[in-house]
C-alpha cells in the first residue's frame, strides 16, 4: 500500500470504494493492464453490516481473473472462512428442512456457500489489489465532485488535506450511502425495492448443523422477509433479519423488537440462545434491491454494487452481484479507454449486461409483490413448503450454481456493440 502523502492530480479511472464491487473492479482492471486509482474512506480491515454469506460467484470471478489459487486460499483458511454445505429452510409453521449439497463424484468439492465476517473477507480482497496498475489509497474520502469537459474533478480528503484528482471515468462503488449517488441526485429510496435489516454477532448458538448449513426462517412477524442464522468460524454466528421497507413502515415493524422477541421469547428459537452470548449491540443497515432499476451509467461514470442497487431481491445477496458488477464494469472501462470515448452510449452495455443477469430474480420478486399484502401469503408459503417446492428448488439450484461457477464463462453480451 502506498505511503505517499499526495494523490496524483490525474488518473484515467477513479474507483471510489474498495468493498467487493470496487475491489473487484480494481482486480479486473489490473488483470486487463489498465491503470487506475482506487480510494476508500475506511482503513482495512473494517466492518460492513451484512449476513456474511458468500455465494459461488466468488470462485467464479477468481477463476476469470486467472486466480484459482485465491479460492484454494479461502478454503484453506478455516479461522476466517467456513464452508456451508447447504441451507436449512424453516417454513412459517415451523417445519424445517435441511438441504445438503453433495457434489457429484467427478466435480470439485467446493461448498455452495462460504461464510466469513465482512471485515475479514473485504480485507482479503483489498490485500490482493497491489499491482503495477493499481494505486490504492485508504483513509481517503471523496467529499465533492465537479463536472469538467474531460470528465470529473474529485475533491478527496487524504492525509488531512483536501486534494483534487481529475479523471476521465468515475466508477462509483461507494455503497448504499453513496456520495456519488447523492451528487447525481439518484439516492432517493423506493421502499418497495429496499429492505431494512439488522445484524448481531453471537457466540455459542445451539443447534447449528455440523455441516454449517445457513438457516433461513420465514416467520409470521416478517412478511416479505426472513430471519437468518449463518454459522461463522470460531463458534460464532451471524444472526439477523430483513424485511421489505414499505411493509416495515406501513405495519410499524420495529426490527430490533422483533429480533429480541425471536431470540428470547419464541419457543422454537429461544432455547438455542439460552447459552449464547451477543458479541456486539444490534446494528442496522439498508439493502438496495435490484428490482428498482437505476441508471447505472452516464457520461464519464458507472455505478457498481449497492450504489447501482444490484442486490438480489429474492434473498438479499449483494456481495456476489457487486463483484460481478465490478468485473463487468472494468471491461467496459477498458473499452472506453481504448476508444477514448466515455459517453453513456459507450458504457450502456454494462447496464444491459447486469440487468440480464438479474432479470429472473427481479421477475420473481415483482410477482411476489402481488401477494405481499394478501391474507393467504403465509398459508401459501406453508403449502409450498409442504409440497417441498422451495427445497426441491434449492437442491436443484445448488447444483446449477456449482456448474455455472466452475464451467461457464461470464459472457459480456453487449461489450462489442
Ligand atoms: C444486514 C445485511 C445483510 C446482508 N447479507 C448479505 C449476505 O449474507 N450475502 C450477500 O451476498 N449480501 C448480503 N448483503 C448485501 C451486501 O452487504 C452488499 O450488497 C455489499 O456489501 C455491496 O458491496 P459494495 O462493494 O457495493 O458496497 P460496500 O460493501 O458498502 O462497500 C462500499 C465501500 O465504499 C466506501 N465508501 C463509502 N463512501 C465513500 C467515500 N465518500 N469515499 C471513499 N470511500 C467511500 C466504504 O468505506 C466501503 O468500503 C447484506 C446487507 C445487509 C445490510
Image (tube, rainbow, N blue to C red):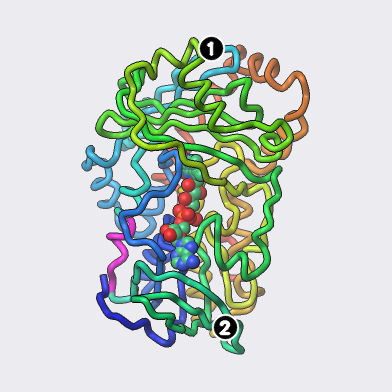
Dot 2: few (<14), some (14–19), or many (≥20) neighbours within 10 Å?
many
Q: How many marks?
A: 2
Horizontally, is 203 left or right of 185 in the view?
Answer: left
Whole-percent x and y of residue 354?
Answer: 59, 56
Query: In the rendered structure, does residue 127 fall within the stretch colored magenta?
Result: yes
Check whether the beta carbons of the residues at disc 2 and disc 1 lie within 8 A of each other.
no
Q: Which residue is mark 1?
A: 95
**Label 1 neighbourhood size at 10 Å, few (<14), some (14-19), many (20+)?**
few
Q: Quadrant of residue 64?
A: bottom left
* Quarter holding residue 11: bottom left
Q: Is residue 5 magenta?
A: no
Magenta region, mostly helix, strand or loop?
loop
Taking the image as shown, residue 208 lies to the left or right of residue 167, namely left
Residue annotated with mark 2: 151
**Quarter of the figure that contains the C terminus:** bottom right
Start-end of magenta stretch = 125-131
Mark 2 or mark 1, which has the lower sequence index?
1
Residue at the (65%, 20%) spot, across then down? 381
Identify the residue at image location x=69%, y=45%: 191
Q: Give the residue displayed 45% in from the left and 45% down from the top.
A: 49
Asked if residue 264 is positioned above or below residue 336 in the image, the reply reads: above
Residue 350 x %, y %: 58, 64
As measured in the structure, the alpha-carbon distance from the residue carrying label 2 to the one carrying label 1 is 56 Å
Q: Secondary structure at mark 1?
A: loop
Secondary structure, mark 2, is: strand
Residue 261 image point, x, y percent = 53, 21
Q: Please tell me whether residue 245 is drawn above or below residue 326 in the rendered image.
A: above
In depth, the one of 23 and 61 nearer the eye is 23
Q: Is residue 247 visible?
A: yes
Amino acid at each position: 500500500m502506498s505511503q505517499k502523502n499526495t494523490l496524483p492530480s490525474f488518473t484515467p479511472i477513479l474507483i471510489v470504494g474498495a468493498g467487493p464491487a470496487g475491489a473487484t473492479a480494481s482486480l479486473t482492471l489490473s488483470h486487463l493492464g489498465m491503470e487506475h486509482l482506487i480510494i476508500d474512506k475506511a482503513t482495512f480491515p473494517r466492518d460492513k453490516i451484512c449476513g456474511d454469506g458468500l455465494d459461488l460467484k466468488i470462485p467464479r470471478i477468481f477463476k476469470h481473473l486467472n486466480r484459482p489459487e485465491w479460492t484454494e486460499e479461502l478454503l484453506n483458511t478455516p479461522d476466517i472462512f467456513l464452508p456451508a454445505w447447504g441451507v436449512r429452510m424453516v417454513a412459517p409453521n415451523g417445519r424445517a428442512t435441511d438441504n445438503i449439497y453433495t457434489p457429484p463424484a467427478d466435480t470439485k468439492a467446493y461448498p455452495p456457500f462460504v461464510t466469513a465476517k465482512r471485515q475479514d473477507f473485504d480485507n482479503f480482497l483489498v490485500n490482493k489489489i497491489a499491482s503495477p496498475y493499481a494505486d490504492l489509497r485508504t483513509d481517503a474520502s471523496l467529499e465533492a465532485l465537479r463536472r469538467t469537459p474531460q470528465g470529473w474533478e474529485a475533491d478527496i480528503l487524504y492525509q488531512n488535506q483536501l486534494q483534487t484528482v481529475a479523471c476521465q471515468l468515475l466508477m462509483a462503488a461507494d455503497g448504499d450511502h453513496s456520495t456519488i449517488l447523492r451528487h447525481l441526485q439518484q439516492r432517493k429510496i423506493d421502499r418497495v425495492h429496499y429492505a431494512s435489516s439488522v445484524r448481531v454477532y453471537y457466540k455459542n448458538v445451539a443447534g447449528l448443523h455440523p455441516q454449517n448449513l445457513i438457516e433461513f426462517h420465514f416467520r409470521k412477524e416478517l412478511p416479505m422477509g426472513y430471519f437468518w442464522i449463518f454459522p461463522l468460524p470460531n463458534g460464532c454466528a451471524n444472526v439477523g433479519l430483513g424485511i421489505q421497507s414499505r411493509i416495515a413502515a406501513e405495519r410499524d415493524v420495529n426490527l430490533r423488537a422483533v429480533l429480541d422477541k425471536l431470540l428470547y421469547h419464541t419457543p422454537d428459537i429461544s432455547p438455542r440462545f439460552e447459552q449464547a452470548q451477543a458479541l456486539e449491540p444490534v446494528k442496522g443497515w439498508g439493502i438496495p434491491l435490484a428490482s428498482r432499476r437505476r441508471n447505472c451509467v452516464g457520461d464519464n461514470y458507472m455505478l457498481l454494487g449497492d450504489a447501482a442497487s444490484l442486490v438480489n431481491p429474492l434473498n438479499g445477496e449483494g456481495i456476489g452481484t457487486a463483484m460481478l458488477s465490478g468485473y463487468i464494469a472494468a471491461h467496459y472501462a477498458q473499452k472506453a479507454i481504448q476508444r477514448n470515448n466515455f459517453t453513456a452510449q459507450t458504457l450502456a452495455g454494462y447496464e444491459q449486461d447486469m440487468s440480464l443477469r438479474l432479470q429472473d430474480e427481479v421477475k420473481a420478486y415483482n410477482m411476489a409483490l402481488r401477494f405481499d399484502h394478501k391474507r393467504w401469503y403465509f398459508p401459501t408459503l406453508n403449502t409450498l413448503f409442504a409440497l417441498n417446492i422451495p427445497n426441491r428448488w434449492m437442491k436443484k439450484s445448488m447444483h446449477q450454481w456449482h456448474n455455472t461457477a466452475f464451467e461457464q464463462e461470464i459472457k459480456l453480451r453487449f461489450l462489442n456493440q
